[in-house]
Amino acid sequence: LKPRIAKREVTLHILRAFGLHASKRLGQNFLVDEVVVDSIVAAAGVTPGEAVLEIGPGIGTLTQGLLEAGAQVVAVELDRRLVEVLADTLAGYDGVRVVHGDILKIDISREMATAPFKVVANLPYYITTPILMGILEQRLPVSVLVTMVQKEVAARMVAAPGGKDYGALSVAVQYYTAPEIAFYVPPRSFIPAPAVESAVIRCAVRERPPVEVTREATFFRVVKAAFAQRRKTLANALKAAGLAAGEVAAIMAASGIDGGRRGETLSLAEFAAVANAWDKQK
Ligand code: SAM
């Protein structure tokens, strides 16, 4: 049995042995909390033989937890130095393939031979949104995403209409998935400790969206317009996005939504009603 990398002294030993310094630029904060690693694996419900995509394995802390649970892991790491470390820390484990590359650039569907698969990651926080949105928009055959994110981002992902956290990210994540915050993680669970609190979020990917949308492009255009101008009414936000006053009035009448409301108060169903009314006019 290999020592658990999630222990503080083991992680410090590995970092020292390889002369590594965590790169701030690449969002490197290594987990040193076994309970957190086990809880992430449990939240993902990993069963033996299951395919998992791990983003940013670092020195292999979470990867090890996934492998101990019997997962078949493809781990994509951008930092070449860490790819070398992983060859050492994960030596002896079957079922792992480390890919050196940028998760925003590689062809994920090509790397993942088995479908569906799960995505499990302690994400680099500087690119959380592009990573999550990229995976969801590509409609990859993912069943569930379990990821560590900044606490504020988790709050935005699960936010209901009306509050300050509700925005384009909330709508998009809730359109593609059913998200829930699994648990919170304090800075001391990482080396180096990040400046922010973290949360593990579990997003079960939906088989079909929760609302009927005639054209997704229109739906997301309305959402984008509404939140680009948070302080404006929905009608004014749509005008600012290029619609004529007459068109906006007709859309509002057809959708039954009051154009005097702020976009941030609209539910997914109401955004869909506006978008579908717009599509009908085209
Ligand atoms: N999984 C490890 C853990 O839990 O201790 C490390 C997590 S650390 C927060 C984020 C990891 O993502 C780092 O190893 C970093 O090098 C890697 N990373 C940063 N940008 C990346 C990118 N564009 N593609 C793939 N990996 C990236």
Image: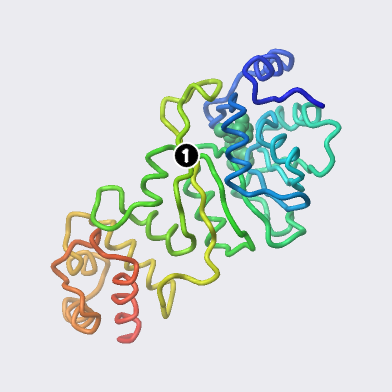
Residue 92 versus residue 103 in the image, above or below: above
Image quadrant assignment for residue 99: top right
* Quadrant where the N terminus is found in the figure: top right
User: Is residue 166 found left or right of 49 in the rendered image?
Assistant: left
User: Is residue 213 found left or right of 144 in the rendered image?
Assistant: left
- The picture places residue 77, in percent across and down from the top left corner, at 67, 38
Q: Pointer 1: what residue?
A: 183
**Residue at point 53% right, 29% down?**
25
- The picture places residue 181, in percent across and down from the top left corner, at 45, 46
**Residue at point 29% right, 71% down?**
270
User: Is residue 226 found left or right of 111 in the rendered image?
Assistant: left
Total numbered badges shown on the rendered structure: 1
Colour approach in the figure = rainbow
Q: Residues within 10 Å of mark 1 (few under 14, many from 20)?
A: some
* Quadrant where the C terminus is found in the figure: bottom left
Residue 128 versus residue 23 in the image, above or below: below
Residue 248 versus residue 93 in the image, above or below: below
> Farthest residue in the left direction?
260
Residue 21 or 63: which is nearer the viewer?
Answer: 63
Image quadrant assignment for residue 253: bottom left
Kindly state the secondary structure of the residue where label 1 is placed: strand
Residue 56 or 45: which is nearer the viewer?
Answer: 45
Query: Which residue type carries mark 1?
Result: Phe
Picture quadrant of ligand 1: top right
**Residue at point 27% right, 62% down?**
226
- The picture places residue 126, in percent across and down from the top left corner, at 48, 38
